[in-house]
Amino acid sequence: MARDRLPVVLERYEAVIGLEVHTELTTLNSKMFCGCPVEFGGEPNTRVCPVCLGLPGALPVPNEAAVEATVLAGLALNCEIAPFSQFHRKQYFYPDMPKDYQISQYDLPFCGLGHLDIEVDGDGAKQRVDLGAEPYATRIGVTRIHLEEDTGKMIHVGGVEGRIAGADHSLVDFNRAGTPLMELVSEPDIRTPEEARRFAQKLRLILLNLGVSDCSMEEGSMRVDGNISIRLRGETELGTKTEIKNMNSFKALHDALAFEIVRQADVLDEGGRIVQETRHWDVTAKRTSTLRSKEQAHDYRYFPEPDMVPFEFTPEWIDAIRVRLPELPDARRERFVRDFGLSPSDARSLSEDVEFSAYFEEAVALAGNSLAKPLANWALGDLSAYLNAGPVALADAKVTPAMLAELVEIIDDGTISGKQAKQVFAEMAESGDAPGAIIELKGMKQVSDTDAIEAAVDRVIAANPDEVASYRAGKTTLIGWFVGQVMREMRGQGNPALVNETLVRKLG
Amino acid sequence: MSFDVSTLSARAIRDGIAARTFSAAEVVDATYARIDAVEGAVHAFNELTPELAREAAGRIDAMVAAGEPLPPLAGVPTGFKDNMNLVGTHTTCSSKILEGFKSPYDCTAVRRLLNAGALPIGKCNMDEFAFGSSTENSAFGPTHNPWDLERVPGGSSGGSAASVSAGMVAVSLGSDTGGSIRQPGALTGTVAMKPTYGRVSRYGVVAFASSLDQIGPFARSVEDAALVLNAISGHDDMDATSVREPVPDFTATLGDGVKGLRIGVVRDMLELEGCAAEVRSATEASVKLLEGLCAEVGDVDLPMSQHGLAAYYIIGPAEASSNLARFDGIRYGHRVAEPSDVLDLYMRSRAEGFGPESIRRIMLGTYALSAGYYDAYYGTAQKTRTLITREFEAAFERFDVLITPTSPTVAFKIGERAEDPLAMYLSDVYTIPLNLAGLPGVSIPCAKCGTSGLPIGVQVIGKHFDEATMLQVAAALEGALALDMTPPAFPLHRRSS
Amino acid sequence: MSISEADVRHVAILARLALSDEQVSRLKEEMNSILGHMDQMQSLDLEGVEPTSHSIPLRNATRPDVVKPGLSRDLALMNAPQAENGAFVIPRIVGVEEGA
Ligand SMILES: [Zn+2]
């Protein structure tokens, strides 16, 4: 396995990786240059118009929200926003491209140089042999972010697994054609497959927080390609790079790059030369293979899109977009640690998703900062388990932030035990009733009345002389059994801490 | 009621219908009768649309019957260049590659003209994809000049020009990328104008060169051209290059004369080698006439504009090569029989579907944009364009309008320049610089050639979005010249009542 | 700059035009003649001159993000040389797979 040999290879070679990330702006209403809706799937050719079908005479008009979303992403990634930018035509013939050119951007993209800071820990950190396997943070440069249009889709008929090779003919569906597509190009600052994965994951979180895309790698609304070369450690010259496509998950991204590093090292070690080419990741075979070599590369004949006029963004316009930047996960995580005293790890988990973090914050606002920690435990524990098990979308969850806050308050004032609380949570998730009502209905109020507890303890001791004798003879592990008996006697409503304390006193 | 539709102005037709002198239905009948009589010799149309015309006429006549006010072009027979989409008609661009193509949507300018009451009479022949200056490059055969059937009507909007000249329609729409409205206007003795770039939406006209194309009218009078311009101008959400400039009533100032207006004669263009003597003298005579009408006339040189042809024959083909990529035989248009694979489908469908001039332009444009040549050709042309634009800006500091000939020669014989692309390209030497600079220009007939009797046109050039002043000068000249531009081959049908 | 027949053939592939040998040799002559004429621009002093892609000073032309009705599938396919199951049919693709 290439993956297993990666650590050994990385001892000698350093990888230089840059990523190209295409993201469909799926949260927009309409396509990039026409009024057709942006949706996934559907019957073929049912979301098309003269513009996105490339009919003679049809003209593209850019979607202003797509331009704004791209600039917003640029600001989130600390990019320079270009004062003068323009669309270009990228020309090549392909059946899924209605006009046989793609409207894209070339030397004048909306967003220029920026960066994204990533953190690497755990096993992934070991890939940086030069850094001694410690957790570390590093900054990855962003070269540019630009806007373009997506292509249509083809269904290949008569071949194997829907691949082109061996197909008899193909069907073209233009529903996806013209979907706004944002392309980010990173600097070749990435050194390990793990860094590539962290970069892509963090970028996805940010774009999700910006609300510009659903970033689904599965449905192809986020697609990551990689450029990769390797060189001997200490070498400053860059090696010949290959481009890797079809990495449809974060794991695929990591594994494909890991494979490619090992493959390139093998070629070099055998005295061979790396061929500059595009390679395809086969997720089943777990290997990359040649898709096309540089000799077949295109002459795209870029030129300024004459159906459109240039863009000139004023500082005021850019500031108006900047105001719309939401709090991003890193800033939110710091605030959760600072204001709520959460552990960095809990804070990270709670801060990544924009809806989940808003849910948590709403509950904290109701219950008070002092209950933030137990709320975090519930949110990351039972709530997450419940959402994942369904799976239930947070928006559809029957447990509201107010209900979770009430539950944690009720636990805090000792009305019910933690164990009871789990039952209450399950009930809430099922019925959507408030915890107070559930406790009332089921008579689950925790009994902290010492007289009632003492009476129950006395009854259990009296009814179980043998066990009492064993305990007193030194078999103190029986205490758990006694607590269970008392709790049963009290129909589960006894305060477990008080029950335990009373038992220990009376048995001792 | 007897009337001669072949000589009536658009305004007279509308007013006649409003006054119930004749009905819109009668206008349709008279129009197709005229077409029956002359179209066989001229071949101005690729398709006639009598059903659409009768439908539209029915709506106009119903308005008359109901006593409703009529729109400004009610009942006016109109031709549309065959690169403009209209639901229910074919759009062929006079190309085999689009034979049979029917658009599922309308061109904005066409729709606006129909909304103003115009009757759609037919789709006019043209040079294939508007590549040409003679309408010989049509897959459906050439259009003949009504003034001399052995001569070309100019191009590429030759069918639109000939249909108006021969009295088959009162007005028509053409498209102008380097002179494709104005040059055939000059060669057929019609009023032909290209508005400022961005004035009229390009949505729905099959693109030749997106940064140069503009739709405009042919008419038999400046006033009719202004009426059409009124109807088709204004911003369109479907065209990112259409402007939001206010649209004045272009007819309002037609009678204001030229007194005090500063008119610049582009001297170096007038003296260009290749400009026929009679064209030069007709232009000079027009200028004298304007001077006599108390215009302030002066000379100006535009040396950069002489490089316009070179810049244009890079920019035009470059954009065209890209705009014509979509004709690939997949979604519409000609598809070769039994393609072995997709590449074969592309290569042979396009080679079979496009005519020689289209192939020439696609090849030139593809080459000019290809790796290694972009800067030398396209980059240089775009910079030359900047210099030409600046030169016009400077000239318009001194003048309100500029005057040049429209075409260096009168109509030439069919076949005469067919084998020499460069000679053909020179037909547009006076019109091209305006497209590069985005300026409006109108050609009006200013003389008939002393030897051949063929029409000669003069071009009035306006400032950006100042079509009004340009048309005002054209109208003053038209009034002073008082020419009868009825082609001799089609003697006037005198009204008998 | 002189254009060879090989150049013409290369450009014809870029432009997806299957040309005959006769067309290639004629286009070679024509393109050399026409582009030779266009070379007159090289005599201009273009140092520091900005390129013009549009002659009017229009900027930032966009449309609001609003859905508009498009074409029915029947209209979308009405001009298709070949259609099947609501999609455009193309013959097999030989050679490379691509993607934007
Ligand atoms: Zn669309």
Image (cartoon, coloured by chain):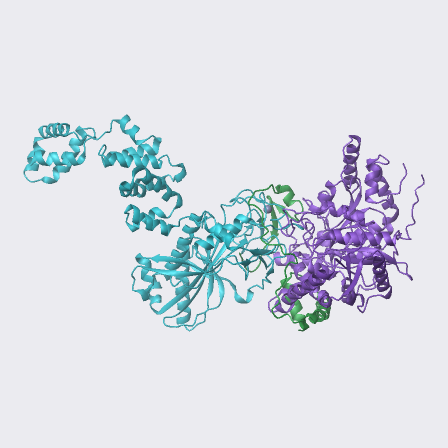
User: Height in image: B392 above or below A401?
Assistant: below
In the rendered image, residue A199, in percent from the top left (x then y), is placed at 40, 57
- Foreground of the two, C62 or A497: C62
**Left or right of C70: which side holds A316?**
left
User: Height in image: A461 above or below B49?
Assistant: above
Colour that chain B carries in the picture = purple
Q: Quadrant of residue B356?
A: bottom right
Q: Quadrant of residue B23?
A: top right
Q: Quadrant of residue A446?
A: top left
Image quadrant in which the N terminus of chain A is located: bottom left
Residue under the point 82% across and 46% down: B170
Colour that chain C carries in the picture = green
In this orientation, does residue A5 appear? no
Colour that chain A carries in the picture = cyan
In the rendered image, residue C64, in percent from the top left (x then y), is placed at 56, 45
In the rendered image, residue B474, in percent from the top left (x then y), is placed at 80, 54
**Left or right of B492: which side holds B428?**
left
In this orientation, does residue A455 appear? yes
